[in-house]
Image: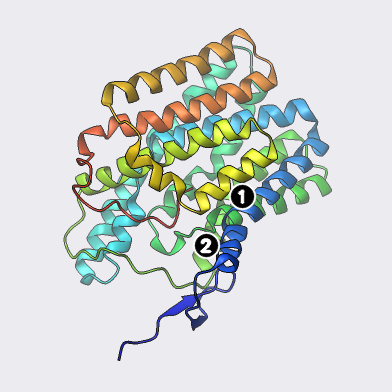
Amino acid sequence: MTEAKTWYAPFWPGRPRPAPEVGKRHILVELTGREYLPMAAAITLWAVVVAAIGHADAARLLAAVAMVRAAQMLTKFATPISLKRRADAPAEIRQQAYQFAFRLQAAALFAALVLVALLAFAMTSIGQHEIAAFIPFIAIGMPARYLRFTDVRTASPYYRLALAGGGLVMVLFGWAAGWGSAGLGIAFGAREWMAYFVMRWWPRTPRPAKVELATPLAFPEVARNSAILGRRMLTYRLSKSLLTLLGPLGSAAARTGRGLNWHKRVEPHVPHHFVGFTLFSLCTIGAGVILALRSGEPAAMVGAGGLFQIGAAAANVVLLWHYLPTRDAEPLPEDDDDD
């Protein structure tokens, strides 16, 4: 007789229950925890920010957040997948994989901090002093994000919920305490640390890896997984950008599609060419630069930051293009943390 499967409820991880049939109710619960609650928390968070510092400064803060995220997207490596696959490997293999992932993420963090410093300098040079002042405060949370990628216990599909909920708590506290724009900028940086500690200490049983390995971790494996996942998530980000034009319903539709993994099903059928990806990345980043230089209005800077994000995500894939496998050569890596 085979052993009965167990299911771990999304809001009470670590408590095994008999595996139910995956029906509409289960899917709705999953979508609520992974997508709808984070969306509601994020909307409330920004409503509090607008009430605390006004529309203009809130837009500048959002632009700074987008620009810091662009630096993170350009330097992102998907190390949690490789660490998860070695969870049951001998101790020396696990130790080697952790040390390699830590060194790689430390190097990525250093490169991202250099990019952030350049972005702050660029914003100052074009007269966007408020955005330049926000950027270092947002960067406070960057070490927490890169540290999280070296700890498989923090990989969770509910990270976005912890991030948005932690950010809401921080800005509510800052608003009640009478913090100004700088204080709310610090709160945004601190939310990354809060989310990291929540994911680190919240009791949960990680899902077992579909592919288990007992070999030392090397860069080609990480690069391959990063390129595949980066290309996959770019499909989602582009669809989200288009659907967001329809307002809240479009954003909800995009998040529903991500929760149902539609982007994973669509991505293999989208044409992929190195030249096309390179041109798309350069044109998107160039459009963001032109928008920032020609307008300078807070809303335009938010748009420029969004273009920087998409361009940086595509550039990350371009930089790792050499490691992309041919289609259907190997199973795509699984990932329960697609932030």
Name which quarter of the figure residue 245 lies in: top right
The residue lying furthest to the left in this view is 215
Task: Give x and y (percent) for residue 6.
Answer: 44, 80
Q: Residue at x 22, y 47 (%)?
A: 328
- The crowding category of the residue bearing disc 1, from other C-alpha atoms within 10 Å (few below 14, some 14 to 19, many at least 20), is many
Query: Contact, CB < 8 Å: mark 2 with mark 1?
Result: no
* Sequence-first tag of 2 and 1: 1
In the rendered image, the quadrant that contains the N terminus is bottom left
Residue 53 higher or lower than 205, as above or below: above
Residue bearing mark 2 = 199
Q: Circle 1 sits in a helix, a strand or a loop, which is it?
A: helix
Q: Is residue 194 visible?
A: no
Answer left or right for 59 relative to 63. right
- The residue tagged 1 is 191
Q: Position of residue 223 (x, y in %)?
A: 26, 43
Percent across and percent down for residue 28 are 60, 62
Amino acid bearing label 2: Met
Instruction: Tell me which amino acid carries mark 1.
Output: Arg
The disc placed on residue 149 is none
Up-down: is 25 above or below 58?
Answer: below
Q: Secondary structure at mark 2?
A: helix
Viewer-side residue, 311 vs 75: 311
Number of labels in the image equals 2
Residue 274 appears in the figure: yes
